[in-house]
Amino acid sequence: MLVFGYRKKFFTGVAVCMSVAMLLVGCGSRSSSELEEYKSSMTEFYDKLSYYDRAINGIDASSDNAKQQLLGYLDEMNETYKTMAATSIPEEFSGISDIAVEASDYMQMANECYHFAYDGDYDEENEFLAYQYYGRANSRAMVMLQVLHGQVPEGEGITVTTQEPGEFTPIGENETEAETETEE
């Protein structure tokens, strides 16, 4: 019997992340093509996470192929995290490059543990480990999103080192002023 013990709680974090991520769409005060490309890549990343959330929560746990569906979506999500971590990060956001790699590494570990949990006989310990690793990947994705929106990330284990004011402009800040300057 297939058990998705942590599935609903597990992927609820993605849904919260996705509702915040929608703010990223249309943001961007810099005309830098690198910033625009990064914004586009990150929007695509968060859109894909939203898709996986809906798809996984839509799996009928009683169906014969539920395990395969779940593991397939997790494999795809893992690849999405890898692509995100490999994306070139503009200098303005270089501080999140390590966080992006950590998020990808934790998603890789979560994916492996989910395979151990559901390939063959159900293994509750590996499911719990996968849940923990996924939580770490998701928390790092949330920190990245906060930084991209110019917010100061908060939480356990988060250390923030800031630059002097005026040394960088987060995506979305002064958007109206930049548009006005461009028109003039």
Image (cartoon, grey):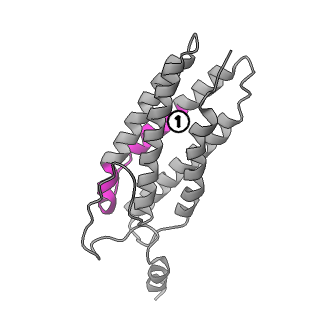
* Front residue of this view, candidates 14 and 159: 159
Q: Secondary structure at mark 1?
A: helix
Q: Which residues are magenta?
A: 76-97
- In the image, is 114 to the left or to the right of 93? right
Residue name at image x 32 percent, y 49 percent: 97
User: What's the residue type where badge 1 is placed?
Assistant: Met
Q: Position of residue 181 (x, y in %)?
A: 43, 85
In this view, 19 is above or below 29: above
Compared to residue 170, the image places residue 121 above or below, namely above
Residue at the bottom extreme of this rendering = 184
Give the farthest residue toward the front: 156
Residue 58 visible in the shown view = yes
Q: Quadrant of the N terminus?
A: top right
Q: Is residue 51 left or right of residue 151?
A: right
Residue 110 position, x and y percent, is 46, 29
Query: Taking the image as drawn, is residue 86 in sight?
Result: no
* Residue 29 found in image quarter: bottom left
